[in-house]
Image (tube, rainbow, N blue to C red):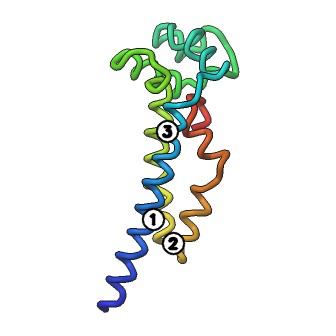
Amino acid sequence: MRDNAKYWLLQNSIIAATAIALLGYTTVRAVSLGITFDEALTFREFVTQSFWDIVTLDSVSANNHIFHTLLVKFFTGIFGDSTFVIRMPNLIGHVLFLFFTWRFAIKVKPAVPIFILLNAHLVILEMFALARGYG
């Protein structure tokens, strides 16, 4: 029984350290990368609209991911319109993704390799570091 507790603690410590490292990576990327054309377009064309116009798709575009656009509008309304603030909804999404993949990996053994496979994909990390609706 004591070995189970040690294994559980070691497994969760490795997952927590990995999650912190991955979140640190996406945060550094979110802070240091210049704004992309798509991010600027989303902000300029859609975030500046009213909530109602965003929800009703007053101007239709594949760049308007409704929930993401509303979150960007909410955060920029509170914290201002810096690149980091525009990317904040995706960073929060990354925290949620890390949490729920940890919960999934604990149920599916072996937890550590499953967690790493689900989270250490560079394309996924890039989506969480940029202000795109995919994150």
Question: Which numbered marker is on residue 28?
Answer: 3
| Residue 10: image location, x then y, percent | 39, 76
The residue to which callout 1 is attached is 15
| Residue 128: image location, x then y, percent | 55, 40
The image quadrant that residue 88 belongs to is top left
Q: Is 60 on the left-hand or right-hand side of 27? A: right
The residue to which callout 2 is attached is 111
Three-letter amino acid code of the residue under disc 1: Ile
Q: Nearer the viewer, residue 100 or 51?
A: 100
Three-letter amino acid code of the residue under disc 3: Val
| 1 vs 3, front mark | 3
Q: Secondary structure at mark 1?
A: helix
Q: Is residue 117 above or below residue 59?
A: below
Which badge, 3 or 2, is on the more N-terminal residue?
3
Which badge, 1 or 2, is on the more N-terminal residue?
1
Q: Is residue 27 above or below residue 69?
A: below
Question: Which numbered marker is on residue 57?
Answer: none
Disc 1 and disc 2 in contact, CB within 8 angstroms: yes
Disc 3 and disc 2 in contact, CB within 8 angstroms: no
Q: Quadrant of the C terminus?
A: top right
Which residue is at a point 40% across and 69% down the rendered structure image? 12
| 1 vs 2, front mark | 1
Q: Nearer the viewer, residue 8 or 65?
A: 8
Whole-angstrom CA distance, mark 3 to mark 2, is: 26 Å
